[in-house]
Image: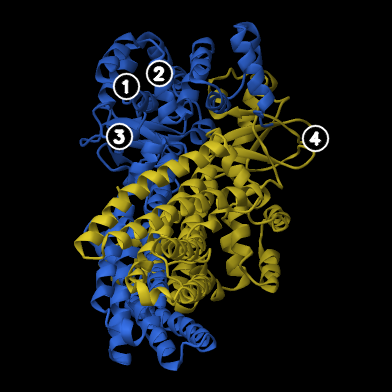
Chain colours: A yellow, B blue
């Protein structure tokens, strides 16, 4: 069933492009899905991809361009004239067309919009450029099927034929009143199973979930997931139906959000990707590394202030990376579980209970690890007192790190800040410092120096 | 539009339950969406939730139970008789019914299946219990609309009315031959816009993506995302149509996968959640902490073997947590970006180029951080030679950590192992050890001890 992209196929395509054998290319790529065409673009040079974009029909190439990485798409668009870009846009739903356009310079944008044949499509695109990219307005498409409550089923089906041609996939039919206010919906299933003479007003479902054009993408994603919606209509403040958002657009949005959280937990800036340039990747990483380094330099200063210990128990210093590592690991675990819990809405119960829970978990983990450390210490000749000191310090550090890891994200969330920033380097670094400070303070108390 | 669950509402519901005021409860919760009912279950006691499950109609409560956390659902089911559970299952699609059933003990399973009224539904459920939970067979629902190629559009619409009543949402109509082999599909849009007398064989689309019943959930998710499918038919080895998988089931699957990767990166076992018990959370964390500890104990031994340095340059030991932290941070960054790149299929180009890229990024980051360390060292009186040693060691450690972080996941992926396990504690711990070894070896060479 799946079309497979092999090295042979790519070579064949490259040879055909070089030979300018358009007939053979068109035959080879006939009926190939746009997602596969996009993968082919990924494998060949920008010039070759441009050649294919100009050669193949815009219906396929426009969708293929949408699937591409932004950078590659921009490179290809640079090789096209405004008229050629407009031809691609003609084939796209308004939401995709707008994503496409917003990457171009203002001047080229204007030329492209002027070159779009379908004036209504152009007007819709201009309107949509005004909405924030991640708002319901930025995510919606203008293409949808709308029917009046006063129509009959038979008349409705007739009128829908015309509308449906512009809509890739009909999810729901939206019912509006005379002033285009959204008043309900109709499933295609209901329409199929209704009598031809029935009035729409008799069969439509008046209860319809909708979102406001200014709602955030997060809110739309949450609503669609909660109620398992495959499409949701978008209205303006007075309830006029403006467009609809489909689940596939939201799926991309949800994946992007998850990817972003993952990157934050790893200490990467938000947009980093494996195929970015060296320079982009450096910029994505360096700020977090500097943050970590500054924290560690703080830890160096703390140790320096305890240098008296060097005379009495220099072995204490062998254990600092261990204490720091345990603090870091515990902090990341606690914060990750809370960040995910907050995202999935399953942080339940009171703060006191959570505090008690974290302390209990910390105690159990700390005692288990402590026994391991003492055993190791005795076997490798570090003596009772030192091993016990390390184990005790580790236990305290584990509890403190768990509390910091748990409550910093809760606090951020409560203040309306994305708790995901509290994972990764931020929490490891601060726990490193706390950990080392607690470790040496306790050691000083227990061993005396 | 959204129904809001306030503390007042919960209190009102609890009071009505206590007063056994069924009429008022039914009126209050009439037309409330099952996702909201599920949220109410989350807020009240298990006994109260059980009371509501028995009171409200099964169509709502069965879907609400599906939305709940597994633990809570099990608690409620424990309070229901097999007949009552069977009533709930009657209202669910086969895929959900199977998820539901598979959580019960074998004995109760049997009693429940015997109590299901609709025999065909029961047979379908028994068949589906045989498939792996995360395979296409485990994810599919048996409910779908199928038509024969020999029917006319008018006849097809008539027959579909009967079938469609069992199907919550009709995505596509699947076309089969006499032996039930899948041969194509028909969109509802096409059906609406076709002439009543046309034959299905004239209007159906013979090109249909499908998956095999034994395909993995990952493969299904990849296919549906790549081709933006909202439903995909499932066939057996001889091409017989068995069921269909819809995008909302896959959406849950994709989110679960992302959540799992996130947890692995944080060093948590796969199923950990914020509202698990203390004991479950301890088990989710402890193994990773022990792994980290064992690694750190290795690092302690390495430092012990360099204890000669204590006499000459004890300050070297102030910098070990710093070197370890940098190694850990760089390792996590590199591995996260590769793991995500592998998941999203954007790790392109040759291994040599990637090697070169990682080395370049490492050099730039290393030099930038090195300058910071030297500045700090000079200001705080650690002297030229020591500062330079730390900076040089850090540069080498950054490059090694980046290479380990990049190539371990690539290697695992190549061997068919989930590369996500290489993130988090695994990479930080191994980089800690490498980092400290490199640091002291270089210091010995540069400072001589």
Residue B47 against residue B132 in the figure, above or below: above
Q: Could you say whether the residue bearing mark 4 is in a helix, strand or loop?
A: loop
User: Between marks 3 and 1, how big is the CA–CA gap?
Assistant: 14 Å
Question: Which of the two marks, 3 or 4, is nearer to us in this view?
Answer: 3
Q: Earlier in the sequence, mark 2 or mark 1?
A: 2
Do tags 4 and 1 sit on the same chain? no
Q: Nearer the viewer, residue A442 or A13?
A: A442
- Residue tagged by mark 2? B77
Task: Indicate the chain on which mark 3 is placed.
Answer: B
Q: Could you say whether the residue bearing mark 1 is in a helix, strand or loop?
A: loop
Task: Indicate the chain on which mark 2 is placed.
Answer: B
Circle 4 crowding by C-alpha within 10 Å: few under 14, some 14–19, many from 20: few
- Looking at this view, name the residue that lies furthest to the front: A448
Expressed as whole percent of the image width and height from the top left, the position of residue B315 reads 40, 82
Task: Indicate the chain on which mark 4 is placed.
Answer: A
- Residue tagged by mark 3? B133
- Residue tagged by mark 1? B104
Expressed as whole percent of the image width and height from the top left, the position of residue A418 reads 59, 53
Expressed as whole percent of the image width and height from the top left, the position of residue A413 reads 61, 49
| Residue A179 numbered mark, or none | 4
Circle 2 crowding by C-alpha within 10 Å: few under 14, some 14–19, many from 20: many
Q: Could you say whether the residue bearing mark 2 is in a helix, strand or loop?
A: helix
Q: Are marks 3 and 2 in contact (CB under 8 Å)?
A: no
User: Between marks 4 and 2, how big is the CA–CA gap?
Assistant: 49 Å
């Amino acid at each position: 069933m799946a079309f497979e992209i092999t090295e042979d196929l790519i070579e064949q395509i490259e040879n055909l492009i070089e030979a300018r054998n358009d007939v053979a290319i068109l035959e080879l790529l006939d009926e190939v899905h746009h997602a596969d065409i996009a993968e082919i673009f990924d494998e060949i040079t920008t010039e070759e991809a441009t050649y294919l974009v100009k050669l193949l029909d815009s219906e396929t190439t426009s969708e293929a361009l949408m699937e591409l990485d932004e950078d590659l798409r921009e490179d290809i668009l640079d090789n096209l004239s405004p008229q050629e870009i407009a031809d691609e846009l003609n084939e796209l739903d308004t939401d995709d067309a707008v994503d496409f356009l917003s990457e171009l310079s203002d001047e080229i944008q204007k030329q492209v919009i002027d070159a779009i044949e379908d004036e209504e499509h152009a007007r819709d695109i201009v309107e949509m450029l005004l909405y924030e990219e991640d708002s319901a307005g930025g995510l919606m498409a203008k293409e949808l099927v709308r029917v009046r409550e006063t129509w009959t089923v038979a008349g409705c089906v007739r009128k829908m034929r015309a509308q449906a041609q512009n809509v890739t996939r009909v999810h729901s039919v939206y019912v509006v009143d005379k002033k285009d206010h959204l008043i309900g919906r109709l499933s295609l299933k209901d329409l199929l199973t209704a009598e031809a003479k029935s009035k729409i007003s008799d069969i439509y479902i008046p209860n319809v979930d909708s979102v406001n054009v200014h709602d955030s993408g997060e809110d739309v994603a949450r609503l669609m997931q909660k109620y398992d919606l495959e499409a949701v209509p978008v209205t303006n403040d007075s309830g006029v139906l403006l467009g609809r958002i489909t689940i596939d657009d939201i799926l991309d949005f949800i994946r992007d959000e998850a990817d972003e959280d993952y990157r934050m937990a790893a200490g990467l800036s938000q947009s980093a990707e494996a195929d970015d340039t060296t320079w982009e990747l450096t910029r994505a990483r360096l700020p977090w590394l500097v943050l970590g380094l500054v924290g560690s330099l703080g830890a160096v200063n703390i140790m320096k202030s305890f240098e008296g210990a060097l005379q009495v128990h220099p072995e204490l210093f062998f254990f600092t990376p261990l204490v720091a590592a345990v603090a870091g690991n515990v902090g990341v675990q606690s914060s990750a579980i809370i960040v995910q819990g907050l995202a999935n809405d399953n942080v339940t119960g009171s703060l006191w209970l959570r505090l008690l829970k974290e302390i209990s978990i910390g105690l159990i983990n700390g005692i288990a690890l402590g026994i391991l450390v003492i055993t190791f210490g005795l076997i490798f000749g570090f003596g009772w007192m030192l091993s016990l000191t390390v184990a005790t310090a580790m236990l305290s550090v584990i509890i403190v790190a768990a509390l910091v890891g748990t409550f910093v994200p809760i606090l951020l969330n409560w203040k309306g800040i994305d708790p995901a920033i509290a994972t990764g380097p931020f929490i490891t670094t601060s726990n490193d410092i706390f950990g080392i400070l607690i470790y040496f303070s306790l050691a000083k108390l227990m061993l005396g120096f």
